[in-house]
Image: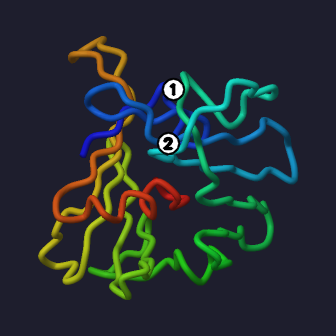
């Protein structure tokens, strides 16, 4: 599954699939404190409202439902609310050392009970599953390329098979 972002910022974008269909909406208000990222997902099979006054529940005729919220805190641990669980990022996205360095790595336990690792890189960010030495790819974030020295491309999030059922968790993770 390849999701394309409408902006270069994963925390403030609409995610579409390969066919252009809307899948997720991520919004983070631009303010210095008390920021909360709201992550919504398209809900299939719900009749469209004809009187959507605020425009927040529908985009291009698609209905969205709340999926997760991330409360960003600059000093203490940020908090993720996802599917009825509330998780502190210092616990659920812990820095752990593998191969002698914890720089740029965050380990999290998904709802399937397995550990995954986000590796934050300059060019791409990717998630991999246990065993980490095998580096089985789960997802990869590709930043926007302007096309100065290579072909331009939109920012995108690629979720590899067989991990597509984890797409909600991957989009809702603060390292994406």
Which one is in front, 147 or 130? 130
Horizontal and vertical percent position of residue 38: 68, 50
Q: Residue at x 68, y 78 (%)?
A: 86
Horizontal and vertical percent position of residue 140: 29, 51
Determine which of the numbered discs, if any, sits on residue 7 in the image: 1
Under tag 2, what secondary structure? Answer: strand
Q: Are marks 1 and 2 in contact (CB under 8 Å)?
A: no
Horizontal and vertical percent position of residue 32: 85, 43
Q: Is residue 96 visible?
A: yes
**Which quadrant holds residue 124?**
top left
**Which quadrant holds residue 113?**
bottom left
Q: Residue at x 42, y 78 (%)?
A: 110
Horizontal and vertical percent position of residue 95: 49, 77
Depicted 52 relative to depicted 152: above or below: below
Q: Name the residue beneath numbered marker 2.
A: 24
Q: Going by the picture, which residue comes out furthest to the bottom?
A: 113
First in sequence, mark 1 or 2: give its number.
1
Which one is in front, 136 or 13? 13
């Amino acid at each position: 599954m390849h999701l394309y972002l409408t902006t270069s910022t994963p925390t403030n974008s609409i995610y579409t699939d390969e066919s252009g269909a809307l899948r997720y909406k991520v919004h983070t208000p631009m303010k210095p404190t008390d920021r909360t990222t709201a992550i919504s997902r398209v809900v299939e099979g719900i009749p469209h409202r004809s009187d959507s006054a605020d425009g927040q529940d529908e985009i291009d005729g698609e209905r969205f439902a709340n999926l997760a919220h991330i409360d960003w805190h600059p000093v203490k641990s940020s908090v993720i609310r996802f599917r009825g669980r509330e998780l502190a990022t210092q616990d659920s996205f812990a820095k752990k050392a593998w191969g002698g360095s914890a720089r740029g790595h965050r380990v999290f336990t998904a709802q399937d009970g397995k550990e995954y690792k986000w590796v934050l890189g300059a060019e791409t960010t990717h998630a991999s599953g246990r065993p980490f030495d095998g580096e089985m790819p789960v997802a990869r974030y590709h930043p926007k390329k302007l096309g100065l020295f290579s072909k331009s491309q939109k920012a995108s999030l690629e979720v590899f098979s067989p991990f597509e059922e984890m797409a909600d968790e991957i989009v809702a993770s603060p390292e994406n």
